[in-house]
Image: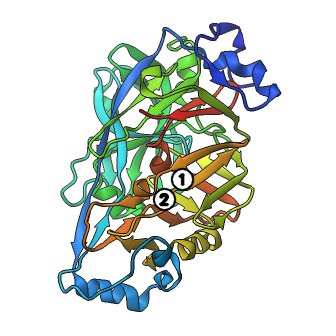
Amino acid sequence: HKFCSSSKLNSLTHPIMKTSVASLVVLAALAKVSAKMVIPLRKRSTHKTVNRERIESLLKDGEEFATSDGPALRGGKTTLSDDSLVIKMYGKTIYYGTISVGTPGQTFNVIFDTGSSEFWIPSTNCTGCETGSAHRNKYNHTNSTSYIKDGAPYDFSFMSGPVKGYYSVDDVHLTPTMTVGSQRFAEITDATGLGPGYSGASFDGIVGLYFSPRENTSTTVIENAFSQEQVDEPIVSFYLGTGAGDDGELTFGGYDESKFEGNLTQHSVIKGKVSVDNITALGYSSGPTNVVIDSGTAFIKAPPAQINLLARHLGLHKFDRAYYTPCNIPLPNMVVTFDGTDYTVPGKSLVVGDDNNGWCMVAFQDNSSPNQWILGDVFMRSYYTVFNFLNETVSLAKAK
């Protein structure tokens, strides 16, 4: 295994609900430890308002899922009789934390992403990084005395597009008292492929924390932090805040029991995925499938056939790859079942926006994978989430 033996781990100090006999052998890996560091996560959202004419276009050109029984079952009707009707088209809500790289430290706002193992920040000579009104912090390795040249080319395609650059090595300061030495990462010199999703965003780069790093890439910061004894355990825990105005926090090396209710329930992760018994909502049932719990994704994503079927059950409208619902008609809860344990996502959490008169975006998106769901921040806001990279488990408890 890529991590050290479990002899480094302390004894279990917090009760954890068991989902199988086999999980008993790895319970110690969720022990509360003294060597842990907390990084505040800030939340940012953007939105725009579209008038009635735009809504009529939506209903004319889009897939009119609202002609199903969904809205009636939810206690309301779809109507465009009000001339003042508007639709709130909200952008993604992202959570980012601040780190520094190099000596002296250069500051960056980064997304901590459990859905990828990529670690990149923009280089000082990056093309496509400084567009529109967004200010971009850029890495200048000539100003760092701890920089080590690597130079190997970097080329990776995200769902939103490709980025290019080259690898470098430098010290990464996750907190003022926690430094990961000689961390390999990518300096991005071309981010034009990411388009407005990056050029107008408030984050600079990504720190990947995925379970299974792709071949020929660098070790993750949590792996290096563990091997360098910066943390007692290779654990990261996310609290994304349950209120509309709440920010979150990321804990390296342990978890914060004040942020959740009851006990943590542990589930196995196989090749980065968790097996799910079922996902249900208002008569919809997915059946057994696989999910990735992804802090770098804002919404819930599913294969097109599944998300379209779910949308029909809920009476949603689809337009331009997004889903909408009348803001004044409540959505039902969604229930995700892992190993016989139900995790409920409140219907109100699935609606993005707070307009009571128009149409609101629903936090669903298509996913190209034929048999994989992605549970993003919409799910994680409801549940404190602990990723254990030694024993490859994820543990969940209701967030406070």
Residue at 67% across, 64% down? 285
**Can residue 53 be seen?**
yes
Q: Quadrant of the C terminus?
A: top left
Amino acid at the residue labelled 2: Pro
* Front residue of this view, candidates 200 and 343: 343
x%, y% of residue 263? 58, 25
Q: Which residue is denoted by mark 2 in the rendering? A: 162
Amino acid at the residue labelled 1: Phe
Marks 1 and 2, how far apart in space?
6 Å
In this rendering, would 22 be left or right of 103? right
> Which class describes the residues within 10 Å of circle 2: few (<14), some (14-19), or many (20+)?
some
* Front residue of this view, candidates 21 and 282: 282
Farthest right residue? Answer: 21
Farthest bottom residue? Answer: 60
Q: Secondary structure at mark 2?
A: strand
**Badge number at residue 156:** 1
x%, y% of residue 341? 67, 41
Please determine whether, in this image, residue 398 is positioned above or below residue 179: below
x%, y% of residue 24? 76, 21
Q: Secondary structure at mark 1?
A: strand
Q: Quadrant of the N terminus?
A: top right
Please determine whether, in this image, residue 108 is positioned above or below residue 347: above
Residue at 48% across, 59% down? 162
**Can residue 148 be seen?**
no
Please determine whether, in this image, residue 129 is positioned above or below residue 160: above
Residue at 38% across, 43% down? 205
In this rendering, would 171 be left or right of 397? left
Q: Give the mark, 1 or 2, whose residue is nearer the N terminus.
A: 1
Q: Decide: marks 1, 2 in contact (CB < 8 A)?
A: yes
